[in-house]
Image (cartoon, coloured by chain):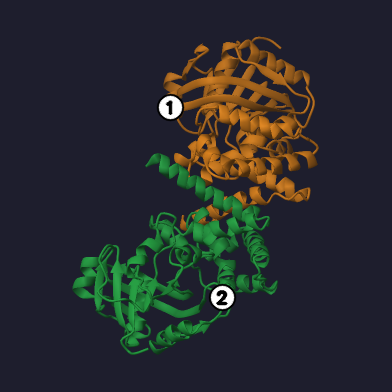
Chain colours: A green, B orange
Amino acid sequence: MSESTRVVVVGAGAIGSFYGAILKRAGCHVSVVLRSEYEAVKAEGFQIDSPLGDLSYRPDGVYRDGDTPEHEADYVICCVKVLPSIDRAALIKPWVGENTRIVLIENGIDIEREVADALPDNPVISCLAFIAVSRVAPGKIEHKAFGALTMGAWPEGITDDCRDIAARFEAGGIDVKLSEAVVGERWRKSLWNTPFNPLSVLAGGADTVTLLDTPGGEDLARAMMAEVCAVAAADGYPMPESAIDKNIAGTRKMPAYRNSMALDYLNGRPMEIEAILGNVVDIAHHLNVEVPRLETMRVAFSMRDVLAEKQA
Amino acid sequence: MSESTRVVVVGAGAIGSFYGAILKRAGCHVSVVLRSEYEAVKAEGFQIDSPLGDLSYRPDGVYRDGDTPEHEADYVICCVKVLPSIDRAALIKPWVGENTRIVLIENGIDIEREVADALPDNPVISCLAFIAVSRVAPGKIEHKAFGALTMGAWPEGITDDCRDIAARFEAGGIDVKLSEAVVGERWRKSLWNTPFNPLSVLAGGADTVTLLDTPGGEDLARAMMAEVCAVAAADGYPMPESAIDKNIAGTRKMPAYRNSMALDYLNGRPMEIEAILGNVVDIAHHLNVEVPRLETMRVAFSMRDVLAEKQA
């Protein structure tokens, strides 16, 4: 594949803009499709402050939802938030041609199926981002730390497509771990996210130190992690017992940290409850695994949604 | 006992003022001890609008915390909210003499022990109020419906003291059910309150219809009720299986209803989490009963408290 690999980033928030910058740096032709902040990005491009250097760039194309592509993309990179209210497949479909590979850089469990079902003829590459990055103003991104991707073909395996796009991310300066079982990788990330993210919100937007210092807090987090392990194992992705200890010890070592869902909550933004928690509970039901603690949180959030709809 | 039975109501909020009015109507000498709204009540007494008629009254004595009683009370009626931050025993102690009986009209499980331990020589009568009453302005109370008391000696039995004070409440116009096992009565009320009150708060202050209409909502409420039943049974107060069905059916029949804890939450007032939920979880731990759903809620609230303390 030539240097002129065409990439379209759909959902160019903090994550999408950052990985777009990496691919731009690697010599790709990078266009972005924006839902908001179109004017700012069209006029000024992205300003990205990063420990990797100045990653600021002007995309080769700046589009809005509903625009029509001029060329077929080699890769559509989907970085849209995974929310029941957002039809991700419909958002990316206009940018997906016969030979386009779909790359998802998104959080959650079982978030590929919906896209793969709607676009069955295009390969799906599933990625997890380990990164601290945030949008500070329209078009302005602050990359604080990390950036590595874990990547695999969905539902499994490592294809030439994976190797190709991984090489481009690496050429742009970030580490990529290729995985034969990306769903298992999602379960490993879920081991932390599925308990801690929603719990931090139910606790009013609490940070990790507050969660673990509360009497009963660590025990509850561990019990929720054990529920995630049980579902993952039933789904075919067992994790070692030691994974829970390691996660707790790692969390204890970090300074007080507010996860992305806590920040979404505190800033009144929609939260990826279904992707991170609800889908785990659904899989548990399907596989007859008891997850009373996760289910309590999930239903509490569903109640909030029902209440919000009534009050809307 | 003569018509001049001396009653001191400590914590004359909506509940305390109402039952003070009932005892006043029955011919008792009724004084009140207030934490706030002293000036208004001292000047104007209580205005109480009620389906029972106009229950407005001027207490025979209006006191503040720290005042000294002029006479020994026959009954101290404690209607103080049950909160970890409030030392109820210390609040009522100045008003309790050698022959004073302590009457608790308060919500929750195992809320008597703290008072009984601090005042071991005075009998404790434990009451549950089934009433819809609220404070609408300083000294102004709206009694909307109901008012019956369930009452028994603590920890068990029906004493002459119970019969005596029950007769006065009845003379004032309300129904009293005397119970040989008031702790069992508390468990029966807890069957509804322990799941629904905290759940409504975690759901953002949701009403009963919202809670039960949410997908998974009724199942979760039933599973939490089953946890309460298991703890109550282990504590020596088994409830029939049908109790859960009856409570759910009863709730379904009611119009949308926000419970007192939901209202406390929405109005930024302290909530009786420990009395209604935490004590149940503590008893479950003590008796080795698994209560994963109740525990999830309890710890989430504890996390909120820890966060609030840090932010204070």
Question: x, y percentage for residue A66?
Answer: 27, 62
Residue B106 seen anywhere in this rendered image of the structure: no
Figure quadrant of residue A26 = bottom left
Horizontal placement of A34 versus A200: left or right?
left
Using the image, name the chain to which the residue with label 2 belongs.
Answer: A
User: As rendered, which of A167 and B229 lies closer to the eye?
Assistant: A167
Question: x, y percentage for residue B216?
Answer: 58, 45
Question: x, y percentage for residue B302?
Answer: 58, 52
Mark 1 neighbour class, 10 Å CA radius: few under 14, some 14 to 19, many 20 or more: few
Tell me which amino acid carries mark 1: Val
Question: x, y percentage for residue A249?
Answer: 62, 73
Figure quadrant of residue B183 = top right
Residue under pointer 2 = A156
Horizontal placement of B291 versus A21: left or right?
right
Q: Is residue B282 above or below residue A30?
A: above
Mark-to-mark CA distance, 2 and 1: 63 Å
Tag 2, which secondary structure?
Answer: loop
Residue under pointer 1 = B136
Tag 1, which secondary structure?
Answer: strand
Q: Residue furthest left?
A: A43
